[in-house]
Structures are given as structure tokens and as C-alpha cells.
Image (cartoon, rainbow, N blue to C red):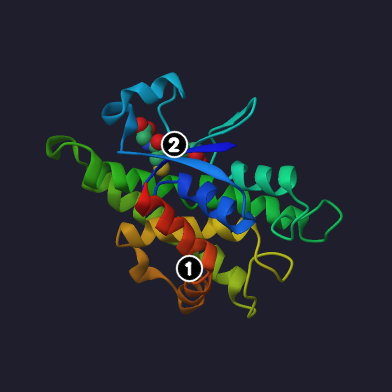
Amino acid sequence: MIELYHCRDARSFRALWALEEMGLAYTLHTMPFPPRFLAPEYLEQNPLGTIPLMVDGETRMTESSAIPHYLATRYGPTPLALTPDEPDYGLYLDWLHRSEATLTFPQTIVLRYTRLEPEERRLQQAADDYTQWFFSRLKHLTRALSDGREWLCADRFTMADICTAYALLLAKDLGLDYKFSPEIAAYWQRASARPAFHAAKAAQDEG
Ligand SMILES: N[C@@H](CCC(=O)N[C@@H](CS)C(=O)NCC(=O)O)C(=O)O
């Protein structure tokens, strides 16, 4: 049985949503955030203290944009992953990585310096600069969607959409969605309307 260590709406949501899209059985461990301080026993499972952690037999993974692709290729075949022979394969890999390294990372700086640090360590300058960073990188998503495409790769919903839509979920949580273009707002509506998205939300609420 696959085990997923999770915190509400954190990056582990990518893995949770992917599990639901694939209809795989899993055990969810929902923890308070940040587990490093509020669930210190978790450090025995993942010495980094970060989430997600997905355990599948001997496989232990801690990168949220890698786990959905692992699930799709390990437990597929499924249209949720692209294969190397498809023309959009490189684009698919780019979006998987871009969703985390380019669209999520700057938001975590904003989160840290506006909400997580104690008042005296908050840094408005850092938050403002990385907000701008995020907004400028978001333009790439608008461009990608501006030819009327519904999903990012291969004219179908894939793990790249899960990973990218998670970055939008975080932006909404941080109140940064006022900069969503009409294309991004519509894309978010489509992605978050999926039954597996709602199932993942319900699963974390139960947890
Ligand atoms: N690149 C990793 C980052 C993992 C990460 O930093 N997760 C955050 C939550 S979204 C975390 O665990 N923060 C708590 C901490 O660093 O103690 C991924 O995509 O999974």
C-alpha cells in the first residue's frame, strides 16, 4: 500500500491529487504544518522534515512534481503521462519541473517572509520582489494557454497540469490570484473542477 505524508494544501497535494486521478489505493498521513516542529517524530521518516514523502515499498520520494510522474509510469499505462515518442514529451517534462522550480519556489519565499517567520523577522522587500518574480514567470503560462488550448501538453489533461495547477492553488492561498490572466483563471476553473481534485480535497479534510 502506498503511503503519503501530507500537510493540508501543501506541495504533497500534487501527489494526493495524482493518486486520486489514478484511482490507486493509499494511506494518507495528514500532519500539522510545519511537521519539523509540530510532528517531530516525522523526522524519523524523512530527515529533511519536508513534505511530501511518498513510500511505495522500497521507494521513498520527496519531490512533489516527480511523484505524479512516478505513479503514472509505475502504475500505468495512463494518458496522464506522456511517453518519449510523443511530440510534446519535452514540453511535458518542462512543465513538470517548471511548476515546482519556477512557479512554486518564489511563492514559498513570499509565504515565509509574510506569514511563517515571527513578526520581527518578516521581510516585505523579499516578499515584494519574489511576488514580482512569480508574476513575471506566470506570463509564460498565459502564453502557453493563449492559443485556446485547454491543457498544457498533448491536448489532454496530464500530470503536468496537476503540478502546474497546484502552483495556482498556492497563489490563491497567498492572495496572488488577482494577477491571473483570463486564460489562467479559466485553466484553474477547469483543473479544479475535476472529480479527483475534489476527492483529494475531501481526503485531506478527513485526515
Ligand atoms: N521541492 C520540494 C520541496 C518540499 C518542501 O519544501 N515542502 C514544504 C511544504 S510545501 C515543507 O515541507 N516545508 C516545511 C519545512 O521546510 O520544514 C517538493 O517539490 O516537494
Task: Name the one closer to the observer, 43 or 1.
Answer: 1
Per the model, the C-alpha gap separating discs 2 and 1 is 22 Å
Task: Report whether the residue tagged 2 is closer than 8 Å to ligand 1.
Answer: yes
Look at label 1 and name its amino acid. Answer: Ser
Which quadrant of the structure image shows residue 134?
Answer: bottom left
Residue 13: x %, y % from top left: 46, 50
Residue 192 shows which numbered tag? 1
Percent coordinates x, y for residue 3 in the rendering: 53, 36
Left or right of 11 on screen, residue 74: right
Farthest residue toward the left?
120
Above or below, 40 relative to 150: above
| Picture residue at 53% right of the left edge, 54% below the top | 17
Q: Earlier in the sequence, mark 2 or mark 1?
A: 2
Judged left or right of residue 114, residue 22 is: right
Q: Nearer the viewer, residue 16 or 64?
A: 16
Q: Secondary structure at mark 1?
A: helix
- SS for tag 2? loop
- 123 sits to left or right of 35: left
Residue 77: where, in percent of width, then height? 78, 53
Q: Position of residue 132 (x, y in %)?
A: 37, 57
Answer whether residue 19 is visible to the viewer in this image.
yes
Look at mark 2 in the image and give the residue it sits on. Answer: 51
Amino acid type, callout 2: Ile
Against 27, residue 90 (above or below) is: below
